[in-house]
C-alpha cells in the first residue's frame, strides 16, 4: 500500500495559499478522488513523491519528457547555458538556431516566433490569423483544448471538462460570440458554420490528433476536408501541435497525416520541459507579426536562453535519432496489445485509442471519435482504475479526458510491469 501522509499534509497547507492547492487544475486529482502526490524529483521513467514513493509514469510533464525525466543531453545543455545568465531580453544566436531547427523539421513553418507557453502560442496565432484575414470569427472543436485564452474556453477539453467548466465564467459574451464550435471529425458541421458565416471566419483551429478529450484520432477525410475548405474560403487553418509536434513524428501530426496547415502552434517539447511555446507558419502570414507587421505580440522572457538550450538539445536529438519514433511506437503497441489481452481474459471491452506514443483507455464499449462519444465513458470507473494503478506504482493522468504519453525509457521489463498492473487494476474495479 502506497500511503502518502506528507503529500496529504502539503495539500492541506497548499490550499491555504494557492487556489485549490495547485497551480494548474488537473493536478488536484479532483476527478479521481484522493490526494495529489507532491513530487520531489524524477529520473527516467520514475516520479518520486515527498513520501518516498516511486511511480512509473505516463504523463511525462504532459508530453515533453519524450526521453524520460532528467535526460542527460537536456540537463547538460541547461547546465552549460546557466553561467551566461538566465535572461537578456535581447536577441541571441540560439534563437536563430532553434528557429532554423524547427523550420527544418516542420516544413509548413517558414517563420516562427517563440513564446512561453502553449496558451500564448494559440492566443497569438489566432490574433495573427484575424489580423491577416481582417475577419473576427474562428471555429474550434468541442473537446479540443488550446490553453486558457478567453476565445478557447468554449466547449474546452482537458481540465476544463474534468472540472465541468467547458465554458468558463469570465469570458465575455462578445468574445464567446466569435468562437464557433463544431463536433470533432464532423466536416459537414464545419461546412454549415462556414456557410452561415460567409467571409467572417478568420481561422479554423484544431488538435490534428486530439489529446484533450482523451485521445481521439481524426479521419484522413476530416483533416483533408478542412484543408480544402480553408483553401477555398480563405480561412487560416491552424494545427495546434502543442502535444503532437515532435512526438508523433519529427514533423508532428501534419507529417503523419500528410495534411499541411497554414499555421502551427507548438509547446512543451520545444523547451525540453522548460516553459516554452511557439507559433509559426507561412511567411506572408507570419510577416504580419510586429515588428515586421502590425499585429502586436511580445514577451520579456520569450526566446529565453536556458529554455532555448534545453529545446535545442531535445530537438537535435529527435532529428538525429529518428529511430526514437519506431521505438516509441513499438513500446506503446506492446502496452496496448497487453491491455487488449488482459481485457479479453477478463471479458471486458473498453475502447483504446492510440497513435504513436499517445493513448487513452476509455471506460466505454463505444467507439470514441468526438467529444460526445468520449463522454459515454464511465468516469467514476476510470477514477477507481486510476487509484488502483497508483497503488501499484503506476502514475497515469488523473482524468479520463487526457492522453497518456510513453517515453523512450520504458523498457520491455517496464511494459510487462505495466501490463501486470493493468490486469490487476481492471480486475479489482469489476463488481
Ligand atoms: N494546446 C494544446 C493542444 C494543449 O494540449 C495544451 C496544454 N496541454 C495547450 C495548448 C496549452 O499549453 P500550456 O499549458 O503550455 O499553456
Image (tube, rainbow, N blue to C red):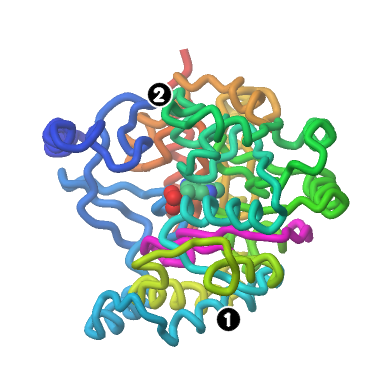
Drawn side of residue 290 relative to residue 219, left or right: left
- At horizontal 44% and vertical 72% (from top left) the residue drawn is 311
Place of residue 285 in the rendered image (x, y in percent of width and height, measured from the top left) = 68, 65
- At horizontal 36% and vertical 64% (from top left) the residue drawn is 274
Residue 378, relative to residue 187: is it above or below? above
**Distance from label 2 to label 1 (Cα)?**
46 Å
Place of residue 80 in the rendered image (x, y in percent of width and height, measured from the top left) = 29, 84
147 or 324, which is in the foreground?
A: 147
Specify the segment rendered in magenta: 257-279
- From the image, which quarter does the N terminus lie in? top left
Residue 270 falls within the magenta-colored stretch? yes
- Residue placed farthest to the top in the image? 431
- At horizontal 26% and vertical 48% (from top left) the residue drawn is 54
Check residue 384 in the rendering and tell me which mark sits there, or answer none. 2
Secondary structure category for the residue under label 1: helix
The image quarter in which residue 91 lies: bottom left
Residue 13, relative to residue 329: is it above or below? above
Q: Residues within 10 Å of mark 2 (few under 14, many from 20)?
A: some
* Res 306 visible: yes
Place of residue 327 in the rendered image (x, y in percent of width and height, measured from the top left) = 58, 64
Residue 164 falls within the magenta-colored stretch? no
Secondary structure category for the residue under label 2: helix
Camera-side mark, 2 or 1? 1
Check residue 56 in the rendering and tell me which mark sits there, or answer none. none
Marks counted in the figure total 2
Instruction: Please say if the residues under marks 2 and 1 sit with CB atoms less than 8 Å apart.
Output: no
Drawn side of residue 173 relative to residue 39, left or right: right
* Res 344 visible: no
Residue under circle 1? 100
Residue 83, relative to residue 70: is it above or below? below
The image quarter in which residue 81 lies: bottom left
The image quarter in which residue 196 lies: top right
Amino acid at each position: 500500500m502506497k500511503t502518502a501522509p506528507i503529500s496529504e499534509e502539503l495539500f492541506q497547507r497548499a490550499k491555504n495559499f494557492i487556489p485549490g492547492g495547485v497551480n494548474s487544475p488537473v493536478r488536484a486529482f479532483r476527478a479521481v478522488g484522493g490526494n495529489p502526490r507532491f513530487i520531489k524529483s524524477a529520473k527516467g521513467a520514475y516520479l518520486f513523491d515527498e513520501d518516498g514513493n516511486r511511480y512509473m509514469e505516463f504523463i511525462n510533464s504532459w508530453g515533453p519528457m519524450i526521453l524520460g525525466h532528467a535526460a542527460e543531453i537536456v540537463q547538460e545543455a541547461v547546465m552549460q547555458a546557466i553561467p551566461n545568465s538566465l535572461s537578456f531580453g535581447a536577441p541571441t544566436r540560439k534563437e536563430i538556431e532553434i528557429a532554423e531547427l524547427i523550420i527544418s523539421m516542420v516544413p509548413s513553418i517558414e517563420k516562427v516566433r517563440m513564446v512561453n507557453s502553449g496558451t500564448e502560442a494559440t492566443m497569438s496565432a489566432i490574433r495573427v490569423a484575424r489580423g491577416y484575414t481582417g475577419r473576427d470569427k474562428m471555429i474550434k472543436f468541442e473537446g479540443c483544448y488550446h490553453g486558457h485564452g478567453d476565445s478557447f474556453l468554449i466547449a474546452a477539453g482537458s481540465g476544463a471538462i474534468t472540472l465541468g467548466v467547458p465554458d468558463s465564467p469570465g469570458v465575455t459574451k462578445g468574445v464567446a460570440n466569435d468562437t464557433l464550435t463544431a463536433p470533432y471529425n464532423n466536416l459537414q458541421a464545419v461546412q454549415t458554420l462556414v456557410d452561415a458565416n460567409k467571409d467572417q471566419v478568420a481561422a479554423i483551429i484544431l488538435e490534428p490528433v486530439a489529446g484533450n478529450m482523451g485521445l481521439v484520432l481524426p479521419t484522413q477525410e476530416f483533416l483533408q476536408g478542412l484543408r480544402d475548405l480553408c483553401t477555398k474560403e480563405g480561412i487560416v487553418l491552424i494545427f495546434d501541435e502543442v502535444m503532437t509536434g515532435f512526438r508523433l513524428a519529427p514533423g508532428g501530426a501534419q507529417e503523419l497525416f500528410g495534411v499541411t496547415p497554414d499555421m502551427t502552434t507548438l509547446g512543451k517539447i520545444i523547451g525540453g520541459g522548460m516553459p516554452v511555446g511557439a507559433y509559426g507558419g507561412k511567411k506572408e502570414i507570419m510577416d504580419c507579426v510586429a515588428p515586421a507587421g502590425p499585429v502586436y505580440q511580445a514577451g520579456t522572457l520569450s526566446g529565453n536562453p536556458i529554455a532555448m538550450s534545453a529545446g535545442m538539445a531535445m530537438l537535435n536529438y529527435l532529428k538525429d535519432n529518428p529511430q526514437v519514433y519506431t521505438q516509441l511506437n513499438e513500446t506503446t503497441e506492446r502496452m496496448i496489445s497487453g491491455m487488449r489481452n488482459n481485457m479479453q481474459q477478463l471479458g471486458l471491452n473498453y475502447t483504446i485509442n492510440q497513435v504513436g506514443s499517445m493513448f487513452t483507455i476509455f471506460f466505454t464499449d463505444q467507439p470514441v471519435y468526438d467529444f460526445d462519444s468520449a463522454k459515454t465513458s464511465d468516469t467514476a470507473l476510470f477514477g477507481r482504475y486510476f487509484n488502483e494503478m497508483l497503488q501499484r506504482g503506476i502514475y497515469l493522468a488523473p482524468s479520463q479526458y487526457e492522453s497518456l504519453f510513453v517515453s523512450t525509457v520504458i523498457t520491455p521489463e517496464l511494459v510487462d510491469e505495466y501490463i501486470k498492473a493493468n490486469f490487476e487494476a481492471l480486475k479489482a474495479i469489476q463488481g
